[in-house]
Image (cartoon, rainbow, N blue to C red):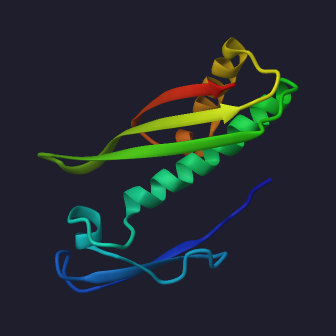
Amino acid sequence: MSIQKTGSAEWQGSLKEGKGTVSTQSGSLKDNPYGFKHRFEGEPGTNPEELIGAAHAACYSMALSMILGEANLEAESIKTKATVTLDQDASGFSISRIHIDTTARIPGADTSTFEECANKAKEGCPVSKLFNADITLDAKLEN
């Protein structure tokens, strides 16, 4: 099975003064602005790292839900945040780290089983597999 989804971007101008828009096939993002000021100076709008973080958090949450199901558990809620670190060195910019923070409420789950499932989700999430970055995880089970 193969599934394809499309994201698109448009850009005009120089790196620092230019501007762009980003859209998704589904239309959930449509012509959202992005640019240097959004990425590096805190101006409202989006940026690639933020979009990668959102995609990783969403993918991880779905992977965790699937793995919990394989353990005969069902989450009441899973809340995930992925923090993407963009570093610069002599060779340029790279995404060096992604830290996943997840908190889940899972009736009947014990901490050991939850942590095992959380780590399997981190390793098995398709977006995790995409990166050549250090991916870390803090997983908390709520009562």
Residue 5: image location, x then y, percent: 65, 67
Farthest residue to the front: give it.
143
Q: Is 71 drawn above or below residue 33 in the view shown?
A: above
Q: Is 19 drawn above or below residue 45 in the view shown?
A: below
15 to the left or right of 90: right
Farthest residue to the top: give it.
112
Farthest residue to the bottom: give it.
12
Farthest residue to the right: give it.
72
Residue 84: image location, x then y, percent: 38, 46
Q: Is 131 drawn above or below residue 69 in the view shown?
A: below
Residue drawn at point x = 39 percent, y = 62 percent: 48
Quarter placement of the C terminus: top right
In this rendering, the count of numbered labels is 0
Choose top left, top right, bottom left or bottom right for residue 98: top left
64 to the left or right of 69: left
Residue 123: image location, x then y, percent: 59, 30
Residue drawn at point x = 29 percent, y = 70 percent: 38
Residue drawn at point x = 48 percent, y = 84 percent: 31
Residue 78: image location, x then y, percent: 67, 40
Q: Nearer the viewer, residue 107 or 30?
A: 107
31 to the left or right of 134: right
Choose top left, top right, bottom left or bottom right for residue 85: top left
